Image: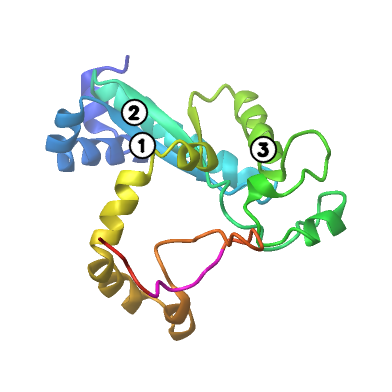
Amino acid sequence: MIKKDVLEKTSAWPFVEAKKMLRERKAFIEKKGKITLQTGYGPSGLPHIGTFGEVARTSMMVNALNQLTDLPTEIITFSDDMDGLRKVPDNVPNQELLQQNLHKPLTQVPDPFQKFNSFGEHNNEMLKDFLNSFNFKYNFKSSTSLYKAGFFNPTLKIILENYEGIMNIILPTLGKERQKTYSPFLPVCPETGHVLEIHVMEIDQS
């Protein structure tokens, strides 16, 4: 443990931000009894230095928090593997195969390396191997797994119930073209299997 007087004087950014978090979110943290930080990964490509940097910075925050509080901490590394494949990466084989599966959820795109069930699963495994090689401590979460398990269902219902209010906040922050298609939901087309970026036509709350 770092000495208390050193902790009080340090201007190192992880400690500055950790102290700020503990101060500004005190009530929420005490209610939860735990501090959870999250990093995100888009598995449309292989892990890279940016991926490392995000988890490294978050780990620095956790290390600082562990010096400042006895509350348990965790890092969730969340993979957005339900995202649609928007373009074919330059550094993978079988590019024609990926080209044929553009816009499908990454866990529905065949693995061009022919090692896993999907391109998303392949990149998730590469991510975990990459992070494990640096001995990072994290809990991996897959968007696909959580959606299929119904984990997000309560939140999706809340978004539907507050749809207009959410749109009133978000739309002014977007460009005119994006405003035409923006929606907090990205449905998967039952015919093409593509992830759709389209606006909501009607909400049936019956």
- Vertically, is 39 above or below 70? below
Q: Secondary structure at mark 1?
A: helix
Q: According to the image, label 2 marks what residue?
A: 64
Determine the residue positioned at 20% across, 29% down: 32
What amino acid type should be assigned to the residue bearing mark 3?
Answer: Glu
Asked whether 19 or 76 is in front, the reply is 76
Q: Which residues are magenta?
A: 196-201
What amino acid type should be assigned to the residue bearing mark 2?
Answer: Ala
CA distance separating discs 1 and 2: 6 Å
Q: Secondary structure at mark 3?
A: helix
Residue 14 numbered tag: 1
Q: According to the image, label 3 marks what residue?
A: 121
What amino acid type should be assigned to the residue bearing mark 1?
Answer: Pro
Circle 1/circle 2 CB separation < 8 Å: yes
CA distance separating discs 3 and 1: 32 Å
Residue at the far bottom in the pictured view: 176
* Residue 126: x %, y % from top left: 69, 34
